[in-house]
Image: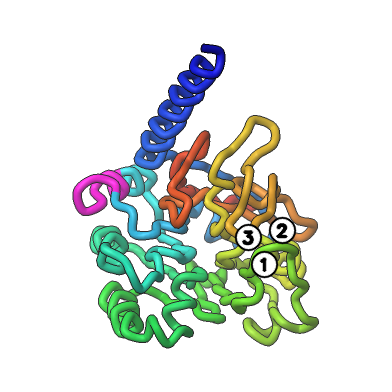
Amino acid sequence: MFWLYIGLILAVLLVLFLWRSAYERKTLSVSEYKVTSSRLPEAFDGTVFVYLSDLHDDVYGEKNEELIRRIKALSPEMLLIGGDMTSAHVNRNKAPFQSFEYLLDAFQDIPLYFACGNHELRILEEEELEAWRPLMEKVIRDHHMNFLKDSRKKIEKNGSYIEICGIDLDWQYYLGGRKRKLPEGYIEEKLGAPGDAFKILLSHSPLYMEELTDWGADVVLSGHFHGGTIRLPLLGGVMTPQYQFFSKYCRGEVKCEKGVGIVSGGLGTHSINIRINNKPDIVRVELRRE
């Protein structure tokens, strides 16, 4: 009888766990950050943008209408997108990038900046996903996105400018286990000398924020870790896709010596379709001149 009670209790807990996860996976949240810097030109003081990452083909409302509504309520001047908008699997039911296109269709009146996640890199690099490349290129072209593939774009305002940058970390830096050290000069080889401009840098993996801010990025925007899947009070995210446990890079703001990192908890799920204390994340950032 004792073990019957234990079994019933565990079954109830499992049902509650799965119910809570299903609820959170479809309940959007907004994380708001203010980045203050003396390096920010006065013309950009008060600039607001929204950062999105890791949609993985998930849809919020019919044709993403709920996600679109929540973003528009934040009145962003530009939309920055940090990758993994689709899930790169050959055997799948969902049309790749369809959910992403619903979103992009609603934001053709503001600048869009897009950098790859590891799933887009797979599309660009793996032979078995070669048929997806024209579709990805069409999505970028038809929606007038600034595609930041190891590149930088200037945004000018009243004679001043800042830069939006995107870096594609090579595949080995997404492998599980220990963090692999970047070779000397790796970032410069991809993005060039930093220069003096205030820089926002999209890097899908958050593991290299210190290296990227040391290079010259003022703000690094990342995702990839899906908030740690399950978040515990005080301890944070339990596990990342790269099998780091309770990493400080799972979600939220990370203070670096020479800049700041912001990690999105992601919008969708992939492989492990669970979220506990970790609702899908829309990131709003306001830039202020110190």
Left or right: 212 as drawn, with respect to 88 = right
Circle nearer the N terminus (1, 2): 1
Quarter of the image for residue 165 reads: bottom right
Circle nearer the N terminus (2, 3): 3
Residue under circle 1?
Answer: 217
**Outermost residue, left side:** 62
Circle nearer the N terminus (1, 3): 1
Front one among 8 and 290: 8
* Residue plotted at (62% across, 69% down): 174
Any part of residue 290 in sight: no
Residue under circle 2?
Answer: 259
x, y percentage for residue 232? 62, 33
Q: Main secondary structure of the magenta part?
A: helix
Type of the residue with mark 1: Ala
Q: Please tell me how crowded label 1 is: few (under 14), some (14-19), or many (20+) other residues with Cα within 10 Å.
A: many
Q: Are marks 1 and 2 in contact (CB under 8 Å)?
A: yes
Residue 266 included in the magenta stretch of the image: no
